[in-house]
Image: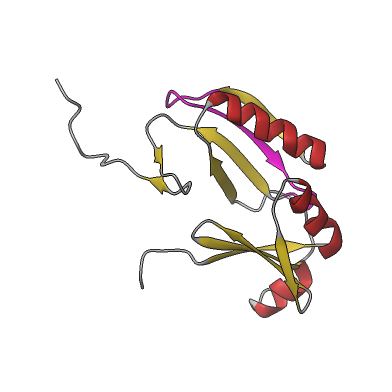
């Protein structure tokens, strides 16, 4: 298996509400057969009915809204941009679950949840560079620091 992710599908309880939320964040989607697709850099974020997604995956979904054990991350180029994105998300209807603050790795980050409880971390990590297209490039963690 190649080391990549092509699509991230979020199970939502109300497709119209979820699409409206992401569009208020400035995303532009295309709806096809009760599924909304957003091009997000080199991958695609998909919104699909939670029950349909669970059934398609062969999973019995009890419909709980607890933490799903996963967070999506959106890295930005500056601390100020973290604050801007969190404010925009709150204005769009998100719940800020962790206000932006200094991180243990020398960065700055905060979190919000969308209307279906999906967790998004907005982070500035000075150790991760972002290309012009927003693609994140991991550093060589095994490299020795200069000096």
Q: Residue at x 85, y 62 (%)?
A: 16
Q: Nearer the viewer, residue 36 or 51?
A: 36
Is 74 positioned to the left or the right of 143 in the image? Answer: right
Q: Position of residue 66 (x, y in %)?
A: 73, 50
Q: Quadrant of residue 31?
A: bottom right
Q: Residue at x 74, y 36 (%)?
A: 88
Say above or below: 92 vs 103. Answer: below
Q: Nearer the viewer, residue 47 or 25?
A: 25
Is 59 positioned to the left or the right of 133 in the image? Answer: right
Q: Residue at x 79, y 57 (%)?
A: 18
Residue at the limit of the structure toward the left, as seen here: 147
Q: Position of residue 44 (x, y in %)?
A: 58, 63
Residue 95 among magenta residues: no
Q: Position of residue 20 (x, y in %)?
A: 82, 55
- Confirm whether residue 14 shows in the render: no
Q: Position of residue 12 (x, y in %)?
A: 77, 62
Say above or below: 105 vs 25. Answer: above
Q: Nearer the viewer, residue 42 or 104?
A: 42
The mark tally for this picture is 0
Screen quadrant of the C terminus: top left
Q: How is the image coloured?
A: secondary structure
Screen quadrant of the N terminus: bottom left
- Confirm whether residue 136 shows in the render: yes
Magenta residues span: 102-117
Q: Nearer the viewer, residue 5 or 61?
A: 5
Q: Residue at x 66, y 46 (%)?
A: 119
Residue 103 among magenta residues: yes
């Amino acid at each position: 298996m190649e080391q990549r992710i092509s699509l991230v599908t979020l199970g939502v309880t109300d497709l119209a509400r979820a699409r409206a939320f992401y569009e208020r964040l400035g995303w532009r989607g295309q709806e096809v057969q009760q599924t909304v697709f957003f091009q997000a850099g080199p991958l695609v974020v998909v919104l699909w009915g939670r029950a349909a997604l669970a059934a398609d995956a062969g999973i019995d979904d009890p419909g709980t809204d607890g933490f799903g054990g996963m967070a999506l991350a959106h890295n930005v180029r500056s601390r100020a941009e973290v604050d801007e994105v969190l404010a925009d998300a709150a204005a769009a209807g998100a719940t800020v679950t962790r206000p932006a603050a200094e991180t243990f790795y020398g960065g700055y980050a905060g979190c919000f949840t969308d209307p279906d409880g999906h967790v998004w971390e907005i982070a500035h990590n000075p150790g991760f560079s972002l290309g012009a297209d927003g693609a994140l490039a991991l550093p060589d963690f095994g490299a020795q620091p200069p000096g």
